[in-house]
Amino acid sequence: MADQTPVIELRHVDKHYGDLHVLQDINLTVHKGEVLVLIGPSGSGKSTLCRTINRLETIDSGEILIEGEPLPQEGKALAQMRAEIGMVFQSFNLFAHKTILQNVTLGPIEVLGIPKAEAASRAMELLRRVGVDAQAAKVPAQLSGGQQQRVAIARSLAMQPKAMLFDEPTSALDPEMINEVLEVMVELAREGMTMVVVTHEMNFARRVSNRVVFMADGQIVEENTPDEFFDHPKTARARDFLDSIKGH
Amino acid sequence: MSAHTMSMRDALYEAPGPRTKRLTVIGTIVSLALVCVGLALVVRQFYVTGQLDAKYWAFFARPTTWLYLLNGFVGTVKVAAMAAVISLVLGVLLMLARTSGIKPLAFVARVIIDFFRGVPSLLLIYFFYLGLPTVGIRMSPFWMITIPVALAASGVLAEVFRAGVNAVPKGQTEAALSIGLTPGKTMFKIVLPQALRIVIPSLISQLVVVVKDTTVAYVVSYPDLMQNGRVLITTNDAVVSVYLVTAVIYILVNYAINQLSISMARRSGNPIISRTTENPT
């Protein structure tokens, strides 16, 4: 399913938070149509890694390439690149003062310059796709967490991104709402979206991903197909981690 | 963030028990009684000293008195409104400069903000009234009162806006940047509108301060409510009655500002209670 065109490449990426070496010589390539899952214990640097890809976190050294081009550092070029890479946050981050519909149309209108009416009809289509079109006139605070996160995904999709980053998209959700969000993500994966997903949902990782990257202490410890990784983890760190989360 | 759904009182105090309820009732009765006694004493003193005599109040029956007060009132409204507009704009600009992340600009903004916050507005007024003319800069009394009042308020407002901007969750900025908004658009479309709603109560207090600051307009002989009241005092030889009436008018004006802002806040009001939590790993 995934072809070999690299969409996101990280080369020798290093980052420190003070004394903490949070990303250590990270090398990673995400190919077109690939679903890459980043797992690891908390504090392992997986969220930070995910956020460096659209420069919500800066890096100290190394290189990040998007479709072969270096990640812009600032200005219009950076904004342009961010528009092309969707991001879904753990805490949804819907614009609290805008309606659900406005949340989805803001980017297309302000960034892509699409006329309001067209943006609205496309947004409604996306909201229908993620099953929250009935809530279009409400504000985020009136929606459940699961609904908000589906709107956040629709907001990203409205920008027609080349790739999407998911930073623990289900970690802030009540258990009964996790599946409704995962289903939308499974659907996206099936349609061939290039995805980087930081998650603790091992079933999702196993079923949907093409590759699992296991991180610990700022390093990529192990990288494999999901079946190999979950059934025959090579390193002690990965075995310990998988043991510790069994039964969840 | 769920604290927003409760009123501040609910958040700070637990629900009273029977003993507290009893104490509250007793306290209310005692303090009401004290207030009544105090008022009675004041009225009695006024009566004894003759302040309630007809001669101190009769001129309020003349339309010219009220017309004169009305003129002063209009003057106050003009100065206060202009000063409010200038200080709001200047406050936003100073806040943007201070939070710009451009170090020299932020430093300059900070110095300006601290200066205007630290200097009494009366001193600023004297500077415009007595200082500037010595270097050949002359302006009308209207601007001599409006500009200093606006400058003094802008320093405070810049800090109020900054507090509001800081109170908007960081995730809002990140989400805006992640869909490709520039930092400028992120500020104006996403952060500032939410910050404004957060700081509406502080904005109201500051507008009231602006109205009260205009009362020193008599220094520059601008005919505001206070200045015209003072003229009435001399022409009618009546201090207490005029000051009482003027005070009531000021209270009504500031009460109106309060009500106006509250209804504005309601009207602008999508509920902006955020369910989001801030805990990135």
Image (cartoon, rainbow, N blue to C red):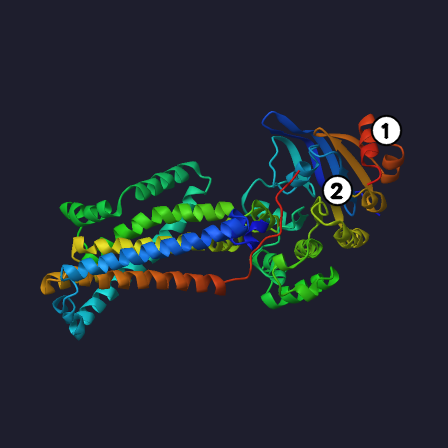
| Residue appearing at x 35%, y 46% in the figure | B155
Q: Considering depth in this image, is A28 or B60 the residue closer to the camera? A: B60
Gap in Å between the C-alphas at discs 1 and 2? 20 Å
Q: Considering depth in this image, is A139 or A190 the residue closer to the camera? A: A139
Quick one: SS at disc 1? loop
Q: Is residue B101 left or right of residue A16?
A: left
| Residue appearing at x 83%, y 26% in the figure | A236
Quick one: SS at disc 2? loop
For the residues tagged 1 and 2, is the chain the same? yes
Q: Position of residue B205 (x, y in %)?
A: 37, 53
Which residue position is annotated with label 1? A234
- Subunit of mark 2? A
Q: Is residue A179 visible?
A: yes
**How busy is the neighbourhood of tag 1: few (under 14 within 10 Å), some, or many (20 plus)?**
some
**How busy is the neighbourhood of tag 2: few (under 14 within 10 Å), some, or many (20 plus)?**
many
Rendered view: A85 above or below B47: above
- At label 2, the amino acid type is Thr
Q: Is residue B45 left or right of residue A81?
A: left
| Residue appearing at x 73%, y 59% in the figure | A130
- At label 1, the amino acid type is Lys
* Label disc, if present, on residue A199 of the rendered structure: 2
Q: Position of residue B238 (x, y in %)?
A: 13, 62
- Subunit of mark 1? A
Rendered view: B71 above or below A159: below
Q: Are marks 1 and 2 in contact (CB under 8 Å)?
A: no
Q: Is residue A203 left or right of residue A155?
A: right
